[in-house]
Amino acid sequence: MPVTTAEKRANFRRLHESGCFVLPNPFDVGTAKALQHLGFKAIASTSAGFAWSIGKADNRVTVEEVCDHLTALCTAVDLPVNADFEGGFAREPEQVAANVARGVKTGVAGLSIEDSTGDKASPLYDRALAIARIKAARAAIDADNSGVLLVGRCEAFLWGQSDLKLVIDRLTAYSEAGADCLYAPGIKTREEISAVVKALSPKPVNLLIGASGLSLSEAADLGVRRISVGGSLARAAWAGFMRAAKEMAEHGTFTELASGYPGGELNGMFS
């Protein structure tokens, strides 16, 4: 019997109550179904992985494209889906709220909002504006009692601003503004991770493992509640494709094709 959207959202919130779980990032319907087949309890979209799958660079997709993608993911699997909603596809809080309301209607169980501007000269939104954007997202989620989990993200480390005090200050403010889960992609060391977890407790913290290199058990020991991998699975898939395609283009040989995943197993998984 299909799992309802309300059930997915309730299941997702329960996952955040204790322990540590892996939240892998598919980049299309097929990879989402594969992750469900492998037994994961929830999945998250990846802005980069999705963008590459439609031939665009990261941060160059539209809110319409992303909402269509999220709808497809949510329809394809019985798992809760956390949306990588970038910066809300707008600067001003009012438009962020409008876009978040659209995102909620796709059926997602969680949705993240970043504080990065995309401008190298001034990579983070002013603190007050960043907080207002989180408050606007919270209000949009609560408007219809959807129960969608809001993730507040501080992107400082990804933009070369490795000031942990700044990150903790912002994440604390986002928590107070209504974020249910906090995320600082780019933090790597045990000391950084532990400091963020302790500062935000009891709110759950998401860790990007592609950056830290820790195992699930090691992250759990530090108090991390959930682990995502960003565009890493997409990059892994592209690595195999590009190796085989480059070999054909540059050498006229086909040996890399032998390392492909068995088609029979793929057919069996999707049948």
Image (cartoon, rainbow, N blue to C red):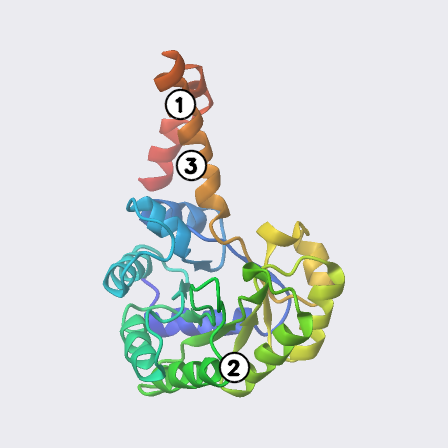
Residue occupied by mark 1: 246
Under circle 1, the secondary element is helix
Find out whether the residues at labels 2 and 3 contact each other: C-beta distance under 8 Å: no
> Disc 1 or disc 3, which is closer to the eye?
1
Which residue is denoted by mark 3 in the rendering? 238
Q: Where on the picture, by quarter, is residue 198?
A: bottom right
Q: What is the spatial separation of the Cα atoms under label 2 and label 3, in whole angstroms?
A: 37 Å
In the rendered structure, the answer to whether residue 235 lies left or right of residue 158 reads left
Quadrant for the C terminus, please. top left
Q: Residue furthest top?
A: 252
- Can you identify the residue that label 2 sits on? 127
Residue 2 position within the rendered picture, expressed as x and y whole percent measured from the top left: 31, 62
Q: What residue type is labelled 3?
A: Trp
SS under mark 2: helix
For marks 1 and 3, give the CA distance.
12 Å
Other-residue count near label 1 (Cα within 10 Å), few / some / many at <14 / 14–19 / ≥20: some
